[in-house]
Every structure is written in structure tokens, then in C-alpha cells.
Image: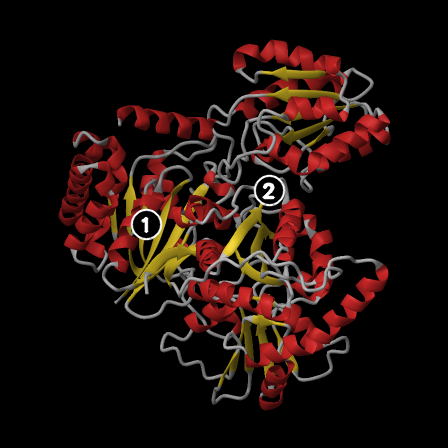
Amino acid sequence: MKIDIILAGVGGQGILSIATTIGYAAVNNGLYLKQAEVHGMSQRGGDVQSNLRISDEEIFSDLIPKGQADLIISVEPMEALRYLPLLSKTGWVITNDQPFNNISNYPAVDDIMGELSKLPQKIIINADQIAKDLGSPRSANMVILGAASPFLTMEYQILEDAIAAQFASKGQEVVDVNIAALKAGREYAMKNK
Amino acid sequence: MQKLLLLGDEAIAQAAIDAGISGIYAYPGTPSTEITEYIQKSKEAAEKNIHRTWAANEKTALETAIGMSYAGKRAMASMKHVGLNVAADPFMNVAITGANGGLVIVVADDPSMHSSQNEQDSRTFGRFSMIPIFEPSNQQEAYDMTRYAFNFSEQYQIPVIVRITTRLAHSRSGVTMAKKQEENKLQMPKNLRQYVLLPAIARKQYNELIEKQVHFEEESENSIYNKFIEGSDKSMGIIASGIAYNYLMENYPDRKCPYPIIKLSQYPIPRKMIKKLYDMCDSIMVMEEGYPIIEELLRGILDDGKTIKGRLDGSLPRAGELDPNSVAKALGFKRYEGNPVPEVVKQRPPALCVGCSHIDSYNALNEAIKKYGEGRVFADIGCYTLGALPPFNAINSCVDMGASITMAKGAANAGLVPAVAVIGDSTFTHSGMTSLLDAIIDKTPITVLILDNSTTGMTGGQDSHGFGRIEDICLGLGVEREHLHIIKPLRKNHEENVALIADELAYDGVSVIIPTRECIQTLNRRMRQKFKAKAE
């Protein structure tokens, strides 16, 4: 088993929380993992990505080679497109459809959606709305992770367990709402893939 | 043994704790910051009372680590590559004094300049000072080699470098710990003149350093971290140092590279091992994350031996970090490289945060200086360097820590009056105070803005030595009371702040203006913690 994932977003959007959940799930199931992160200057509202590699064999490169990512998971639609050179021919793009507009020349949203719709394998989801409907706007990233879950080649239950462990210190309520977000995202993906 | 998911930086930090250090000394700098932060957050480090507060700069950090080593205890100094420039004076000389307690200097290089002004390769400094370098290729080696480095340092009474680059520093993987070691006891150097570098003693010590080289090289030949891996195809031999080895192996999914390989992670360079590869193969490919150091040495001045491939002949890119794709090309593989980025995607450069005090400071400065024309603002290193970008376009330099004030002084000496310096509070206490003293002594007409956001912002909000002290420091250095102002950078104070800056621009001497308002990031963090504490 081997999966290469690009996590994408804008500095401050918390893409690493998604990485933490997947990473926890992987490591607790005896898999190898490498996760390259962006620290420093770009965290100030610039584009950020994380290369997440999971395998049942030793992993060498911390970076995913171009054209080899199995998944792009993005919390922002334009950022999903930025990493297309990394995506494999059979790869999936899972992205939030809510723009994060902090630049003066942000493109027209229709143009971004037009590019996304051209992709052969994609899940485009309004994670913000789904999280809001669940009464937990801060769980949007977990909705996106849920939408990506059918493609992770990992048992779904393992992710729920990881969330339970990750949020345990914040109380059962927080755990429950994040698991609900995960489920909602997953359901959307199953229906729309 | 326990397995932890650690960044390369954190693996080094955990290794330092487990190796029994008594102190970590550092100034924040990407990609090295997380080493010290990990130790600062460690319960174990707190229980053991390991010294772990930030230093004013890399020079004071390294000197303090040298003092701890003198007293027989294990010490680590960590810094980014350009930080070693600041610490170069103690660094070059501690090679001559040698160490007593284990002394490990961690330097995190930043090839491709993700968060830096240059991509200098610290292995050059290792050669320059003639001390051993350890260059781990992964997180586990970062842990293991740091432990090894402390033992090596004590065995040979020599400071050593652990050199990593951004990708390893900021990439996470599972790391297995080894048995912990107790702290050393206080113990003076056997020779109390070891650290007295009077010329007569320095000459003797220098000879000893030269004599040690043969032992260092012997260690490199036999090190478990330098591996000669046999291969059947002798048309080429490959030398892969540090994390370059990972990119090489990535290109052989079955892990079977046909060429003989030297996986190199310990310096000085093991010459016998290299000779064996050279004699065995028709050509040599050198893969290095950084400068083509091994490649240049292998080519020599005349470059008239066997064919050498690497960064100098274009097989690999001359600058920037390596990646699996550039290495694939060098090996002659043609790989699918994905679809291009659609044109609709726009650049998203980093920017000052919404609510950042620097925004108001720059808006005021831009308006006050407008009538003098462009090109008069010398800035420094920190979040406020982003003032170079639109919409501010406010600054004209960012060279090195503290250079803003001294460059403004030089420009003013040349006749560019008024000249302005913009520097942050932490950068000011790092390297700006002596610059300001120069200007005061000369009574040079410059206006200095010390943007005081009470933190080291760009690296994530570490404590600043300048906290609550900037005004007193300026007065102590000799800034005139009537030309020292603290202002509050807020939109509602804009007109008032513009007028004050304009007045000081017209003053024929040193003025210091301190726009003071807390970093919005640290403020938010503080408020969240306060809220949380209240809720509990």
C-alpha cells in the first residue's frame, strides 16, 4: 500500500490539522509516513502545501515527485489547481469550493470552477456550508477530510479513531461534531464521485 | 523503544535532550527555530532544568554554548545558515580551542531560499574551520547522528556541526529513541590554557587541530553513516550526500540502483572510499543538497580526470534544492510530469496580517517621506520586510540583520538626506544596537523607526529581548530625549503620526521613532489562552 497526498491551502487555514489526523491514523496502523510542511514566511497568508506520503514500505523522498500524487486535498479552490503538475494521471482532486480571497488579482470564481470541472476525477464540495449546517463552522477541514476518505485506501473507522484521539482533550462534544463533519463529507463524496 | 512522529528539527532536539545536554542556545531563524521550541515545550527539559531561553543573537548563543562546554557540560547551539555568519567569529575560533563538554552546532541551510536571503552551504564552514560535519539523510538519522555527534565531540575534544536543510528540518516521520544519558558533571578543562588563544597558545592548538584531521578522516572512512553500496553497472558511480540519497533511491521503486553508490553523511570526505568508487567506475555523478562542494573537489582545478557529472555540468540544476524529478533527469529517466498549472491560478505571496501594526507604520512613513521621493528607506529582516511588496512598496533594502541602520547611515554620509531605517524590536536587539551607536557617535542625520510589536514575529512569535526595553536602550546609547518618540500605529492616529515622522525627517541628527503595538498573531493567541483559562 502506498499513497501520496498533496494538502493545499492558504497560510492560516489550518491544512496541517488534516495532515495530523491522517498521519495519526497511518502511524497507529504501523505504516511508514513522511510529511513535509511549510513553515516560515509563506505562513503569512501565502500559498502553503504539505506533502504527505504513506506506505507499508520505507519511504525515501520527503517530496512527492511530479505526476505521482494520488490525491490533492485542498481547502481552497484556486490552491487545488496550483498543484496539478504533481497529480498522477489517475489521481483525484478533493477541494472546498469556497475561495479565500486575500489578493487583489484573485481570478473570477467561474473561471476557477471552469478549470476544476475539466478535471476527470474530482470532488468539489462546499465544506463551509456543510460544517455550518452541522453547527460547527470550524470543522470545515474535517468535512474535506471526510470527502477525501473514500480515496485514502484506509479503513474509514481508523480515521474516526484518529479524530477521537486527536480531540480527546477538548471533550466528547468536540469529538462528536468533528466525526459528524467527517461523515457528512464522506457521504457527499460517495454520492458525487 | 518508543516511536515518535517528529520533524527533523524535533528529532535533533529530542536527541539533544536524550544526550544529556545542559543547555540549548539559539536565536529564532527558519528552518532551525523548531529545535529550540521543542526543548522549550518539553516537560522533560523543564524537569531537568535544561537552559532553553532564546539568546540575543547567534553569536551570543554560540559563545554561551562554548562557555557551557568549557565547564564540562554538553551544549547545543542551533541556527539557520546565515546565523552562522553572525556567529562566525566564535565559530572559527572554537575550532582552535576545541571542546570540553560535548559541543554540537546545528546549522539548518535553506537551499531554494524559502525563507532566506541566500542559500549558502554550511558544509563550506565546516571545511573552513576544519571540524567534522554530520549530515543526516532522514529523521531517524537526525536523531541517531546527533547522539553520535555529542560522543564524537567529547572523544576528540572538538566542536562538531550537524548540518540539515529545509526539507529535513520541516518534514515529519517516525523516530525511534535510544537510551537516555545523564547530564555531565561540572568539570573544568584539564588544561586551563586550552581556551586562551594568545598567539603562542593558538599556534600550538592550531597544530593539534591539523593533527586531528587524519583521525577525523579515518572516522569518516569507517563511519556507519558513510556507506559503500555495491552495484553491477560500473559505467557510473554515484556519490549522494545527505538527503540527496533519498531522491536517488526514490527513482528506484524496487530499491535496486544498478550503479555503485556512496551514501555520504559524515565529513571530512572519506578519500579512500571515494578513490575506490572512482577507480571502479567510468564516470562519477555527484548529488549534493547545496553547493557542488564534493563535485568541485573531485574535479580539482584542472578537471582532467574521468567524467564528473553534477551541478557544474548541468546534469543537475546549478542552484536550488534537489527533488526527485531533477535527480530523475540526471539519471536519464523520462517521467510523466503532470499537467501544467492553469493560467487562471495567480501568485499568492505572503502578506502582512490583517490588523498588523506594520501596515499603519508603513502608511504613515510613506506619506511623510513622499515629498523627498523614492529610494530612501533601508529595512531589515522580519515580517516588515513584506513592506517591499504592494500595496506598500515602502522599502529599498533587506540585506542582513541590523543592516538597516548602518546602511541608512552610510547613505546619509554619502549625502542621501533624509535617510530612513526600519527595523523590528527583536532585530534591533539582535544586531541593531551597535549600528545605532555608530550613528549617534557621528551625529548622522538619519531617522530610525524601530517597529516594536513585542515579539519575534516572522518565525512565529518568540520572546523578544527588546520587550519593554527599547526606549531605555536608545536613551542609554545616547539618543536625544527630544528626538525619541513612542507612537501608537493605529489608523486613527495616522495624521498625527505622519506629522511627527515628517518633523523628525527634517532633523539634522539621529531621531528614533518607536511605533509600539503588539503583533496581531501573538495578541490573538494570548486572548485565546485567556479565554480558555476563563472557561476552565
**Depth-wise, is mark 1 or mark 2 nearer the camera?**
2
Display colour scheme:
secondary structure
Left or right for B417, reference A71: right
Q: Is residue A146 visible in this depiction of the protein?
A: no
Question: Mark 1 to mark 2: distance in Å?
Answer: 32 Å
Disc ID at residue B55: 2
Q: What kind of element bears circle 1?
A: helix
Left or right of B225: which side holds B533? Answer: left
Is residue B280 something one can see in this rendering? yes
Instruction: Answer with the quarter of the image where residue B393 lies.
Output: top right
Left or right of A93 on screen, residue B86: right
Horizontal relation, residue B499 to residue A120: left or right? right
Q: Amino acid at mark 1?
A: Ala
Q: Residue at x 35, y 70 (%)?
A: A58
- Between residues A171 and B385, which one lies in front from this camera angle? A171
**Residues packed near mark 1 inside 10 Å, few (<14), some (14 to 19) or many (20 plus):** many
Please name the residue shown 68% across and 50% down the image.
B87
Q: Nearer the viewer, residue B488 or B1?
A: B1
Residue B4, x across and y down, in percent: 35, 58
Q: Quadrant of the N terminus of chain A?
A: bottom left
Give the quadrant of residue B103: bottom right
Give the image quarter of residue A185. Answer: top left
The residue at 73%/30% (across/down) is: B375
Q: Of A16 and A149, which appears nearest the observer?
A: A16
On the image, the x and y values in percent for residue A6 come to 36, 53
Residue B439 vertical position relative to residue A24 in the rendered view, above or below: above
Circle count: 2
Q: Position of residue A59 (x, y in %)?
A: 37, 67
B9 is higher (above) or lower (below) than B207: above
Q: Write down the residue under mark 1.
A: A19
Chain letter, disc 2 residue: B
- The amino acid type found where label 2 is placed reads Ala
